[in-house]
Image: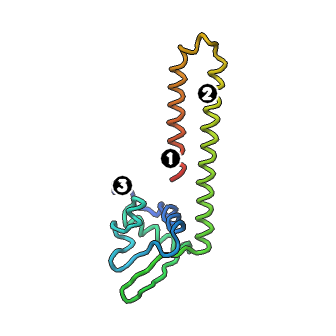
Amino acid sequence: MKRKKDKAITASNWKKVLKEIYDFAPNKWGESNKVSKYDDAHDLAQRLKISGQELGHAISFLEDQKLIKTNISNPKEYSAYWLITEKGFNIAREIQTERRNAVQQLTIIFLTYILALTATFRFIPESQHNNLFIWYFVFFLIGISIIAYMFKRSIR
């Protein structure tokens, strides 16, 4: 698992962290005296492929915005886990809905692209099919590549 160490440390990963806490709440993610939220070895940082420092900034941001709260379960040995608040729950649902809508829109774009390409090919005279088939195949592959790229960017 490679992580990008050279990118600037920001709290821009807060949506990923919030979604992960939302998906596995309650009591899945937290920190202890053994593994801090700023530790690169933290399971959540490794799962999201971000540094511990980025995770720490994201958690701090989420706590400042009152989207999550830290629940200390064992104060003697410091063991805590993160709980999603009602406000955090609502925002996580919004993020989930946005992602679902993006996937649906890209599916519609993909199907429309296939339909348009097929319809265009249908109106070419039979004698020209062999000559233009390769060009249509190339356009098909380029279109699929662009749609796949858009899909990958939209689900991040």
- Name the element at disc 3: loop
Q: Looking at the rendering, in which quadrant would you find the N terminus?
A: bottom left
Q: The disc labelled 1 sits on which kind of residue?
A: Lys
Residue mark closest to the camera, 1 vs 2: 2
Quarter of the view holding residue 99: bottom right
Q: How many marks?
A: 3
Relative depth, front residue between 118 and 57: 118
Residue mark closest to the camera, 1 vs 3: 1
Q: The disc labelled 2 sits on which kind of residue?
A: Leu
Q: Is residue 96 above or below residue 64?
A: above
Characterize the local packing of mark 1: few (<14), some (14-19) or many (20 or more) Cα atoms within 10 angstroms: few
Position of residue 75 in the picture relative to residue 152 (left or right): left
Residue in the image at 60% along x and 43% along y: 106
| Whole-percent x, y for residue 57 in the image | 43, 68
- Name the element at disc 1: helix
| Whole-percent x, y for residue 129 in the image | 58, 15
In three-dimensional space, the C-alpha distance between marks 1 and 2, rounded to whole angstroms, equals 23 Å
Residue in the image at 61% along x and 63% along y: 93
Position of residue 105 in the picture relative to residue 45 (left or right): right
Label 1: which residue? 152
In three-dimensional space, the C-alpha distance between marks 3 and 2, rounded to whole angstroms, equals 39 Å
| Whole-percent x, y for residue 6 in the image | 34, 55
| Whole-percent x, y for residue 30 in the image | 43, 74
Relative depth, front residue between 19 and 8: 19
Label 2: which residue? 117
Label 3: which residue? 4
